[in-house]
Amino acid sequence: MGKSLTQKILEDHLVEGEYVPGQEIGIRIDQTLTQDATGTMAYLQFEAMNVPRVKTELSVSYVDHNTVQIGFENADDHKYLQSVARKFGIYYSRAGNGICHQVHLERFGRPGRTLLGSDSHTPTGGGVGMIAIGAGGLDVAVAMAGRPFMLTCPNVVKIDLKGQLRPWVSAKDVILKVLEIFSTHGNVGTLFEYGGEGVSTLTVPERATITNMGAECGVTTSVFPSDEITKQFLDAQGRGDQWAELKADEDAEYFKVIELDLSEIEPLASEPHSPGNIKSIQEIGELEVDQVCMGSCTNSSYRDMMIFAELLKGRSIHPNVSAVVGPGSKQVVEMLAENGRLNYILSAGVRMAENACGFCIGNSQSPKTEAVSLRTSNRNFLGRSGTKSANAYLVSPEAAAAAAITGKFIDPRKLEEMDIAYPSVENPAEFIVNDNMIVPPVDDGGDTVIYRGPNIGDPPKNEALPDTIGGEVTIKVGDQITTDHIIPAGSKMKYRSNVPKYSEFLFEVVDGSFFDRAKEIRDSGVHNIIVGGISYGQGSSREHAALCPMYMGVKAVITKGLERIHKANLVNFGILPLNFENEADYDGIDQGDSLEIPGIRGAFAAGNTVTVKNTTKGTEFQATFDLSEKEREKILGGGTLNLIAQGS
Ligand code: MIC
Ligand code: SF4
């Protein structure tokens, strides 16, 4: 039997276990990336491991999230990161150079390599034929220390692309279609591998848009073959020597094969407040639009910005629309500045943001109360824009431009009725390569002093798990609680390096009194327990969604289902992730109930269930845990760092 592309790359990197879907494997990580909002904690943890230099082929530290710099905190973090990069042999991509995923694709992504990144959109690298996986910062720190990354060997789903996209429909619509088919949950343990004749109709940045947003489906990652188109892209980046052809065998077998005819896809959008709420734009109807945000790691490539610019050429944005562009990288801006397209955007009245995450994470450009905001980004979770009452819709660059011009949420094909032709954009034969904002690693001779401003605190420590967890249900939440619900980013993100302060914002968007309650419970000497519905912990890789609960004394999370990265983060910080064996038991628990989970060590040794006693209601139920031996050890020991400190 032939092999999928995924199997080939994973087998090539296998250091523990066997390539058997569903089983735990350990893979060698060639490249890592961090961004500043997750990076400070990741490097503090790396420092705690006492490894003199990173052991990967390449590690890059990007600054792209916290660049607003209101107050000293962001700048302190940047300086810390730069000094750490110098000390440990890491490339440092300075603030202003661009969004980690876009820059990594342009300058470092390499077919056939593995990439682990402390950001859930690391799968962007799949556009260039990498197995690129998002993880918590601690997992990335462990990989930088040369240890394998442990994961469940995925079930590979082939997405067989046929045909070619029609004008006004683009890669964003493809991934929105994939989201319509697969939704945002129920895909843990799967991986999307793209194939079929339609692949050759998509450029690398278009493929990267598709793999980027696979993260919203909750898959381990997504990957495209590496072909002539990949070669052209790498040649244009001056990195043609890093190309290798990679594809699945003709007779490869897959867990499932889904056919997708590109020529049948319509302009689509995600309605508020989930990327999985897909509708065709025609179905949504012509809403008045208040804001248009163009950019983010999903749609900020040269191709996307060019389409946006060409559509705005000689026009003005609608008087009721506030439009902003956040380009993906300095390279993209340099290209647009050189070919004059930047001026099409500026003269139309679009506001220019820096080459950073910006609006996407609610770090700036929050829309007005109850605004209709059209965004080319990948997430429209409640409150993520910084305005809780706003309605954010996720769309393609084409639809964003159409709304910027007309002030209406229209199917971009309608622009033809205004005599606006669909622009044709070719990828350049050569991109401008100017890496002057990337500081390469040096041999520092041991003389680098790590800079620590007052915003940098030590990562909090945890103790071994007691044999009985006993405490209160601090919060009971519903289905599809994202990490944005658990701990917000936006204006609070500057406290990422200060866990006690950041913890004050836990569950803020759901229940502003969580912190006070959790503190009272913790300080009274009992444990906090969280109860959740299906697909708990969707979205980002931010380990603070586990680290801050750990700091607040949360010892167990009982849900109807956990998403991959969040579950790994809980394990890394010694929090017990449990599932209701019988989902109906969720209904029998209320916030404030006292729960007792006795005999955890025995339960770990015996199998995969524990009894949870609800002493308030006088009932009990069974909860299951899906944990490998290693994961059980980590939880019992109080988390990964404790085990590493003990030498295991
Ligand atoms: C996001 O898009 O939610 C983020 C901000 O990039 C996160 C990382 C973080 O919270 O720092 C992610 O996607 O992992
Ligand atoms: Fe940045 Fe947004 Fe991409 Fe996250 S999704 S990395 S915040 S641009």
Image (cartoon, helix red, strand yellow):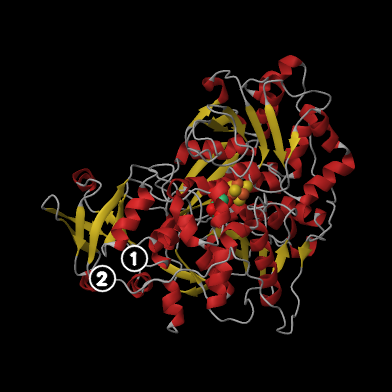
Q: Disc 2 residue type?
A: Phe
Q: Which residue is mark 1?
A: 627
Residue tagged 2: 604
Ligand 1 closer than 8 Å to the CB at disc 1? no
Q: Quadrant of the C terminus?
A: bottom left
Taking the spot 75% from the left edge, 41% from the top edge, the residue there is: 303
Circle 1: residue type: Leu
Q: Position of residue 628 (x, y in %)?
A: 35, 69
Give the quarter of the image for residue 423.
top right
Name the spot of residue 607 as percent of width and height, x first: 23, 68
Residues marked 1 and 2 touching at CB (< 8 Å): yes
**At x 48% / y 71%, what residue is drawn?**
26
Look at the numbered disc 1 and give the secondary structure of its residue: loop
Around disc 2, counting alpha carbons within 10 Å, would you say few (fewer than 14), some (14 to 19), or many (20 or more)? some
How far is disc 1 from disc 2 in space, using C-alphas?
9 Å
Location of residue 378 with respect to 230 vertically, above or below: above
The residue tagged with tag 2: helix, strand or loop?
helix
